[in-house]
Amino acid sequence: MSIKLFELLLQASIYTVTISVVSILIGFAIAIVISAMLLSRQRLFMLPAQIFISFFRGAPLLVQLLLIYNLLPVIGINVPSIVAAVVGLSLCTAAYQAENLRGGFASVPVGLVESAEMVGMTPIQIFRRIRAPIALRLTFPALVNEAILILKASSLVSVVGIVELTRMAQDLAGSTFLPLEIFASAGLIYLIINWIVALAGGLIERSLPGVPR
């Protein structure tokens, strides 16, 4: 396989990484809200959050992407394919991240929170200094794993017209008749990207307060 073909795969991988990173960050922001709703004792908040998680964890991502891509124009929202792809990935990963965060917040020792209340800390201070750091530390490995899964799942956005790494590999394999070399190269690029994410995640995890170095 020529260097030119490999460069085309690398260029397509930029779309894969960009779409994945943006989706993960947006999904994390949504997940914080959803997890807070899950931890609420009010059914008005819990029920919508449970329905959200049940749908986006239960329906295949491919179906979600196609549904969002075809639904947005119907309700009068015309957006580029890349926006529809990001929306689909963000909502999907938000459901999984919300469950991870819910488990992390639920694992925060009650006695620690009660002690903070007794010394006069406000709810915001308790959340910022105790609940959030502990929950993040407990759930960080799962969040890194979810990031890797989204990077791999981003190959599905080709169904809405995005030429990312997998779609580029398919196009090149069909035009050059070199499927083995092309897909092996694409697999290698995915492997390197995910290895970098896992390595960065491990470094960040060790730098978190309370984590042994």
Image (cartoon, rainbow, N blue to C red):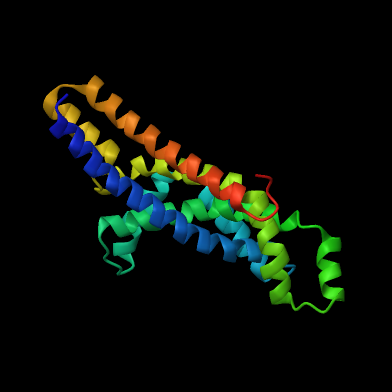
Q: Is residue 187 above or below residue 66?
A: above
Residue 104 seen in this snapshot = yes
Residue 201 point in image, percent of width and height? 52, 46
Residue 99 seen in this snapshot = no
| Placement of the N terminus among the 4 image quadrants | top left
Residue 63 point in image, percent of width and height? 40, 46
The residue depicted at 29 percent of the width and 42 percent of the height is: 13
| Placement of the C terminus among the 4 image quadrants | top right
- Say whether residue 74 is left or right of residue 42: left
The residue sitting at the front extreme is 213
User: Looking at this view, is 193 or 80 the one in front?
Assistant: 193
Badge count:
0
The residue depicted at 12 percent of the width and 25 percent of the height is: 176
The residue depicted at 72 percent of the width and 65 percent of the height is: 130
The residue depicted at 68 percent of the width and 50 percent of the height is: 138
Residue 82 point in image, percent of width and height? 29, 56
